[in-house]
Image (cartoon, grey):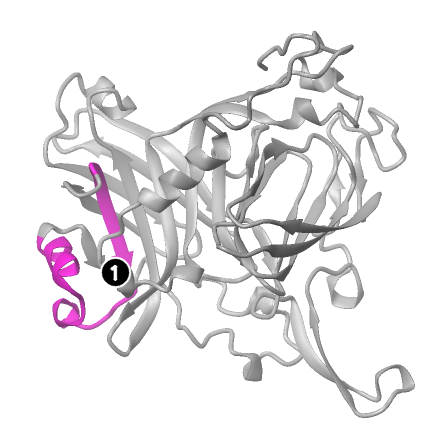
Amino acid sequence: MRRVEPGAVPNYSSDNPLERLLTVVQETRLAAELECYATPSLQYLLPHDWLELYGPSSPNTDVLDPVAQDFKTDFQKQNVADFRLGDTRAVRGWALAGDWTGPFLHLSYRAGPDSALARAHGGSLGDRLLLDVQVEGGGRAEVEAPYDPDSGRYVAEFWGYAGDDLESRVGARGRQSLKLGILQPRPDLARGAPDAFGRAGLDGRDVREVAPDHLLHPLRPLRVVLRWRSADGTASVGPVTLAFQMVTRGWDAYLEVGRSPNPHGGIGFLEYRNLLSNYFRFTGSGELGRRLEPYNLDAFGRKGTGGEEPFLAVEYMDLHVLEAGCGIGLHRHRDNSEVFLMLEGEGWMVVGDWAEPERRDRCFEVRLLRAGHLALLKGGNLHGLANPTDHEISLFMFGGYD
């Protein structure tokens, strides 16, 4: 943690971490033209190998161990001061090629002499890397990742396109990427049909069990394990464990959908969507609960109780209006969960890890949060939200202070 002198306030307007992170997102170059991607679907995964938080305010200035920071109302100790991204990045979403829509997975590695692989190799990495990629629930392959001069990174982008005419369906950048081997039609790695989760076929079904190997499943996390190697095979890094797992729910991401006749003795029909639930078939799902670490305060403010809380404890409900070009900064939660529900507008939602998680390397995960959709984060997560538009956005937020 970065110690802050008593009485001092960090300068959040200079070199702001949220702005820096979203600049990386905006500068990400995919393999084809921008019009070949459904922008609202894009999800970015940016592992970080170093993270610094601001220390607490006075009188707790020198309590720099997060385990001992039990004073919940000092928010300064939550805020991210600085970070350093790792060498690997990933993006997934829907690709568009003429009348075809399908999933894609973009994986890249930083070029230059100071990457971990370049240091292990002891010299230049050349014009391509080797990549061993395993998509959980899907396929595994050893592929080449050529150097992309437009992004300054080694890139392999997999599209779920099964035909042999993709070159005729993309523009000049896409054709150049196909020629270089950056853009790779790989329906074995990028699985899933665009209509797999259509409303009409899901009545009464547990959506978690539908198309479990879909690259863009709306509920199931996507875990990808990578090993990067030099072209001559003499140096390698990994495994790098990535996981797209931000909990977002809304009109097209739900546990179950159906129609209830005479709802609670009423008139006509009610169409419902279960977003997060501990009821009926979802009893014990754990989605609304949390595992208590030894240093966590539980819902009653007691420390060291351990075990599980199978519920979401709510200490506040707030309405927020975020002005154009403004953002809620990157900050972490040690103990409590929080829900962001977008009422009007859209914004870039960031959820990530400040503590070491079990199933992925620590990362920032970024995706667009649209009206009618919510994002859930838990203790151990960090988060932020930016309004990149030229108008206000409205949020409903509820959870527990941390």
Q: Is residue 349 above or below residue 95?
A: above
Is 163 colored magenta in this rendering? yes
Q: How many marks?
A: 1
Q: Is residue 154 above or below residue 61?
A: below
Quadrant in the picture for residue 299: top right
Q: Quadrant of the C terminus?
A: top right
Position of 264 with respect to 348 (left or right) is right
* Residue 271 rendering spot, x and y as whole percentages: 71, 81
Inspect this view and state whether residue 373 appears: yes
Q: Which residue is mark 1?
A: 186
* Residue 283 rendering spot, x and y as whole percentages: 78, 59
Is 172 colored magenta in this rendering? yes
Quadrant in the picture for residue 98: bottom left
* Residue 227 rendering spot, x and y as whole percentages: 31, 36
Q: Quadrant of the N terminus?
A: top right
Position of 336 with respect to 163 (left or right) is right
Instruction: Check disc 1: other Cα within 10 Å, few if <14, some if 14-19, many if 20+.
Output: some
Q: Is residue 172 above or below residue 257?
A: above
Position of 256 with respect to 80 (left or right) is right
Q: Is residue 241 above or below residue 319?
A: above
Amino acid type at mark 1: Arg
* Residue 386 rendering spot, x and y as whole percentages: 53, 45
Tag 1 secondary structure: loop
Q: Which residue sits at x=50%, y=46%?
A: 325
Inspect this view and state whether residue 215 appears: no
Position of 296 with respect to 377 (left or right) is right
Camera-side residue of 322 and 178: 322
Q: Which residue sits at x=50%, y=63%?
A: 212
| Residue span colored magenta | 152-179
